Amino acid sequence: MYGDKGRGLLWEQVKGYRKNENDMQQGAASTGGMGLDKKTLEEYIDACMLVKETEEEIQRLEQKKMPAILGKVKGSSPDFPYQARSFTISGTAFGYGEEKGLREQKQVLMERKARAEKTKLEVERWMNIIPMRMQRIIKYKILEEMTWEETAAKIGGKETGEGVRKQYERFFEKK
């Protein structure tokens, strides 16, 4: 999912986040003290999609500014001998007011993207400190949107869909 470099970076973040063994044990026993709940976890998927969609909207805004108008005019050199010359001029079809509006729209989109990225990062950090079994359950059920039965099959062992669902529910009740 993250590639070799990404795994190394994530591991460095995890090591920095888990300062000592007590922090790890507390993280495993609860939701890591970060105050995350099911709602925030479910918003993770929306945050991922929002980042992608916002980047596409920013690209569209950038393309709106691209159209340039080209033209050729004739004039003369400013110094003696005043010889006739051709000049190529270019510019955008946007006025200052229109460009200002596009910049404001882009700023709003950048703020939206930053908020979604913050939520995404918060959940990813939290996922690194919860028990591995719960990481797998969340990955399959929430992130990959599998049914409880499919999640139980992926977890393996003698787990049932209902058993996995109960583990998930109890984990969030510990908060």
Image: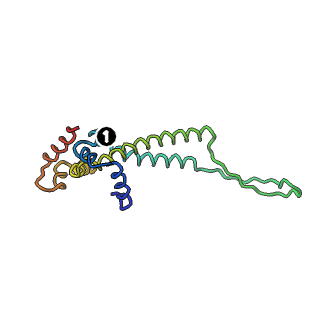
Residue at the extreme bottom: 4
Residue at image x 26%, y 42%?
A: 31
User: What crowding class fits label 1: few (fewer than 14 Cα within 10 Å), some (14-19), or many (20 or more)?
Assistant: few
Rendered-image quadrant of the C terminus: top left
Position in image of residue 90 (x %, y %) = 67, 51
Q: In the picture provided, is 70 more to the left or to the right than 1?
A: right
For disc 1, the marked residue is: 34
Residue at image x 62%, y 50%?
A: 68
* Viewer-proximal residue among 87 and 140: 140
Q: In the picture provided, is 73 more to the left or to the right than 24?
A: right
Q: Mark 1: which secondary structure?
A: loop
Residue at the extreme right: 80
Residue at image x 32%, y 45%?
A: 123
Position in image of residue 89 (x %, y %) = 70, 52
Residue type highlighted by circle 1: Met
* Viewer-proximal residue among 122 and 38: 122
Number of numbered callouts drawn: 1
